[in-house]
Amino acid sequence: MPTCIERHDHTVDEQGFIHYDDRPITYEQADQIAGKRLDRRRNYAVIDGAVHEAAHYTMACSGCYEGHNSDSATGHGCSECGYTGRRRHGFWSPLGDLDAV
Ligand SMILES: [Zn+2]
């Protein structure tokens, strides 16, 4: 389910894992920060006062892809990727960047 969050801070614990202090906000709040009405089907995050949208892409699994199939960029499968040969990655992209692609 699409949501909006605002990232306030992050901390690093003793093991070196990053914990983000993400708090839910409403689409109306995100609209105000973005200065326009946002797509209710998408996820947004406010980071450093700027609206970012969730972007996803798939790429060959780093665990098993060794030039196995350069056409499809799919690995031969391993436990890391669930034997699909591909991994799904997500990141936050500044609003507008994806439209330019
Ligand atoms: Zn793999």
Image (cartoon, helix red, strand yellow):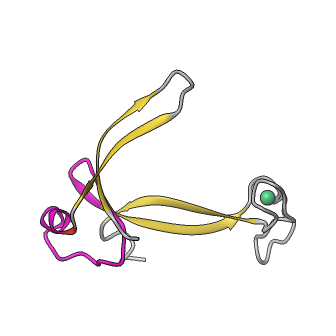
**Ligand 1 image-quadrant field:** bottom right
- Above or below, 11 against 59 in this view is above
Q: Quadrant of residue 29?
A: bottom left
Q: Quadrant of residue 58?
A: bottom right
Q: In this rendered view, identify the residue nearer to me: 70 or 85.
A: 85
Answer left or right for 47 relative to 49. Answer: right
- Asked whether residue 82 is drawn in magenta, I would say no
Q: Position of residue 48 (x, y in %)?
A: 25, 47
> Which residue is most to the top?
14
Q: Position of residue 24 (x, y in %)?
A: 28, 55
Q: What is the count of numbered marks?
A: 0
Residue at 53% across, 33% down: 17
Q: Position of residue 80 (x, y in %)?
A: 76, 53
Residue at 57% across, 25% down: 15
Magenta residues, start to end: 28-51
Answer left or right for 20 relative to 14. Answer: left
Residue at 43% across, 77% down: 101
